[in-house]
Image (spheres, rainbow, N blue to C red):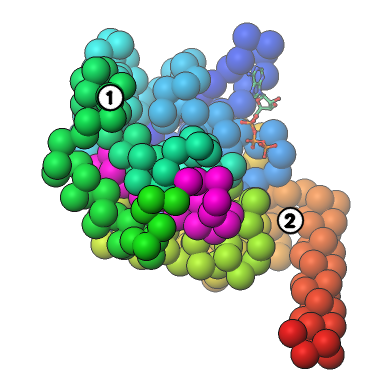
Amino acid sequence: MLEIRDLTKTYKTGDKALNNVSLSVPKGQVVGLIGPSGAGKSTLIRCINRLVEPTSGAITLSGRPLTGIGAGELRAMRRKIGMIFQEFALVERLTVMENVLSGRLGYVGFWRSYLRRFPAEDIQRAYRLLDRVGLMDQADKRADALSGGQRQRVGIARALAQEPELMLVDEPTASLDPKTSRQIMRLLIEICGERGLPAIVNIHDVPLAQQFMQRIVGLRAGRIVFDGTPAELTEAVLTKIYGAEDWAAMRKGTEEDKAADADTLREMLRLGA
Ligand SMILES: Nc1ncnc2c1ncn2[C@@H]1O[C@H](COP(=O)(O)OP(=O)(O)OP(=O)(O)O)[C@@H](O)[C@H]1O
């Protein structure tokens, strides 16, 4: 369980990026975080992994504090947080297997990791994870030889290699096509469910969030203005989160994207692809 209580972040510039945010995410639940640009989504994720120092408030993971702790404790707690990034953040010239094993770097000593001598159990775990994300036959390929969807699967396996207690996911599908995005989102949700992992997914794509998330939290100007199910995320609520003008523009964008996808499909069928 992740618990955030009265979290506030005011940057040195005076920007109040988060204003009294409280949120609990139970084990196995995946929360989609939506909101307009500047709403505070990245700041919230960065306060949880403590890349940004909160101004006030408290965060706990599985009952242990993530705020108000020393450097050693923080390092230990960070191992418990699996991160998944928009641009995958893989080491391109290393193999898929090496990238997954890099998730263990917080656990093995410096020389062992420098020499890439990981314990046998880490290697077995990495194979199991590659199997789970559907990449067993790609283990020895270099990361830069993979497709975007395959790279994100490696990113997921690497995060799981940490044996995390929380997943923080930043725009996981922003670099992927719509079909691959749906596959990745489905995989993420299945895996978090199987492992009882709480997760927060920063997601710009509202229809994708509505299709897959069990719970959606809407941020606006640093405050939670919606917390509910996809079914409760009505046009009126979306207008409240994004503002009338921005939501109308976003909806138009989505409809244009759908029309473009349909055009591409028709063209492919016409060409017999
Ligand atoms: N390092 C920083 N220094 C000062 N202000 C910042 C910093 N990072 C973010 N902010 C401000 O904090 C507010 C929230 O920004 P944040 O990046 O968290 O929003 P966001 O919802 O993630 O936006 P986006 O969807 O565009 O990534 C904004 O007003 C932003 O200008």
Q: Amino acid at mark 2?
A: Thr
> Considering the numbered disc 1 on the image, is that residue within a helix, a strand or a loop?
loop
Question: What residue appears at the point 26 percent right and 54 percent down from the top-left corner?
Answer: 127
Q: Quadrant of the C terminus?
A: bottom right
Answer few, some or many: residues within 10 Å of disc 2's Cα (few below 14, many 20 plus, some between 14 and 19). Answer: some
- Residue 157 lies in magenta, yes or no? yes
Report whether residue 170 is seen.
no
> Considering the numbered disc 2 on the image, is that residue within a helix, a strand or a loop?
helix
Q: Indicate the quadrant where residue 22 lies.
A: top left
Determine whether the beta carbon of the residue marked 1 sits less than 8 angstroms from the nearest atom of ligand 1: no
Question: What residue appears at the point 19 percent right and 50 percent down from the top-left corner?
Answer: 124
Magenta region, residue range: 142-164
| Residue 120 location (% of width, % of height) | 14, 42
| Residue 141 location (% of width, % of height) | 44, 51
Q: Which mark is residue 115?
A: 1
**89 sits left or right of 264 in the view:** left
Residue highlighted by disc 2: 239
| Residue 209 location (% of width, % of height) | 56, 61
Report whether residue 254 is seen.
yes
Above-or-below relation of 65 to 93:
above
